[in-house]
Amino acid sequence: SGIAYQLWKTHLERLLEHTQDIPTRFVHYENILDNQLAIQELRGPLHDAGVACDDNQIHRLHGNLVRPNRGPCREKTDTLPPAVAQLWNKLLRLHADQS
């Protein structure tokens, strides 16, 4: 619905605004749900938070916390309102530019 998209957009715009001057790590929800990508996706944020753990520990943590039956995230932007699609694409670029 249009209201839901506007709330999501406002929430993320404010998040980006208020985190621009602090170290920020973006995670991709779909990657956390995917057993093959989860370790790679979580390794950086855990390291940035000062949590020392190996891939086996991350795998166990993932298994205890993530419920893979949650609904998927939206990947296609063709049905989004233009301003929402633009913000979504910006978030995907920010995520991709992290190393």
Image (cartoon, rainbow, N blue to C red):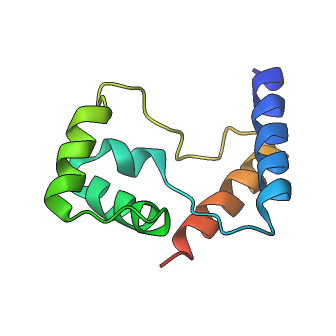
The quarter holding residue 66 reads: top left
Q: Residue furthest left?
A: 56
Q: In this view, does 1 lie to the left or right of 73?
A: right
Q: Is residue 57 left or right of residue 78?
A: left
Q: What is the x, y in percent for residue 60?
A: 17, 45
Q: In this view, does 7 lie to the left or right of 65?
A: right
Q: Which of 44 and 53 is in front in this view?
A: 53
Report the quarter where the N terminus lies.
Answer: top right
Q: Can residue 46 be seen in this view?
A: yes
Q: Residue at x 49, y 68 (%)?
A: 48
Q: Which of 81 and 40 is in front in this view?
A: 40
Q: What is the x, y in percent for residue 9?
A: 80, 40
Q: What is the x, y in percent for residue 33?
A: 33, 41
Q: In this view, does 59 lie to the left or right of 96?
A: left
Q: Residue at x 77, y 44 (%)?
A: 84
Q: What is the x, y in percent for residue 16?
A: 78, 56
Placement of 46 over or under 21, stated as above or below: above
Placement of 16 over or under 40, stated as above or below: above
The quarter holding residue 91 reads: bottom right
Placement of 1 over or under 30, stated as above or below: above
Q: Can residue 82 be seen in this view?
A: no
Q: Which residue is drawn at 54% across and 40% down?
A: 74
How many marks do you count on the picture?
A: 0
